[in-house]
Image (spheres, rainbow, N blue to C red):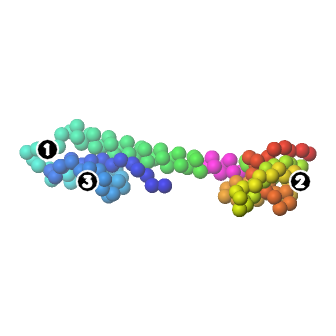
């Protein structure tokens, strides 16, 4: 997934940049400081950069870094949560092996999708596209399609 994080515009002797340059998008704090020092060394002495502009740019780069760190943390949490949920679903499905279950099985046909209720003893569980499926003979259905479970 590509991030669309806004970039910091740089004010200098050549005017305001629009912030769409890819190299600016990947700056870390150290590179940004080097860029600012270079900018300060080469600025027009008759029209120097204001302190508020410098502080504003530093603030913006810190906000971007904080946003990137938060995004990475949230992505890691989501991945962990997805793994836990998959484990729980797989454990729930595995617990139904040997149980008498009724569920809705869907089969693609030339006319569309045929849905039928299937009742029987679950003989195995498979994992497809990150979701567990219960199998009764040659029919299969997901946990969300269970209608009834009996001993």
Residue ranking furthest to the top:
52
- The numbered disc on residue 136 is none
Task: Please name the residue that numbered disc 1 is placed on.
Answer: 48
Q: Point out the tag, 2 or 3, that comes first from the N-terminus.
A: 3
Residue 103 coordinates in the image, percent (x, y): 81, 49
Q: Which residue is drawn at 32% across and 58% down?
A: 23
Residue 115 magenta: no
Of the pair 151 and 12, the residue shown nearer to us: 151
Task: Please name the residue that numbered disc 3 is placed on.
Answer: 35
Residue ranking furthest to the left:
46
For the magenta stretch, what is the residue range?
Answer: 80-87
Q: Residue at x 47, y 44 (%)?
A: 70
* Helix, strand or loop at mark 2: strand
At label 3, counting other C-alpha atoms closer than 10 Å, the crowd grade (few under 14, some 14-19, many 20 or more) is: some
From the viewer's perspective, tell me whether residue 145 is left or right of residue 84: right
Residue 108 coordinates in the image, percent (x, y): 72, 59
- The numbered disc on residue 121 is 2
Residue ranking furthest to the right:
151
CA distance for labels 3 and 1: 16 Å
From the viewer's perspective, tell me whether residue 45 is left or right of residue 33: left
Q: Which residue is drawn at 85% across and 57% down?
A: 136
Of the pair 81 and 33, the residue shown nearer to us: 81
CA distance for labels 1 and 2: 80 Å
């Amino acid at each position: 997934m590509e991030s669309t994080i806004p970039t910091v515009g740089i004010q200098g002797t050549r005017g305001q940049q629009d912030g769409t340059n890819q190299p600016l998008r990947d700056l870390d704090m150290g590179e940004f400081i080097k860029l600012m020092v270079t900018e300060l060394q080469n600025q027009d002495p008759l029209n120097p950069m204001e302190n508020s502009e410098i502080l504003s740019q530093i603030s913006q780069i810190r906000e971007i870094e904080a946003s990137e760190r938060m995004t990475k943390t949230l992505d890691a949490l989501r991945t962990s949560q997805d793994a836990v949920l998959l484990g729980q679903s797989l454990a729930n499905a595995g617990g139904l092996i040997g149980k008498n279950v009724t569920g809705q099985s869907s089969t693609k046909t030339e006319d569309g999708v045929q849905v039928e209720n299937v009742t029987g003893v679950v003989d195995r569980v498979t994992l497809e596209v990150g979701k567990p499926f219960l199998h009764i003979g040659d029919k299969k259905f997901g946990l969300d399609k269970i209608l009834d479970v009996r001993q």
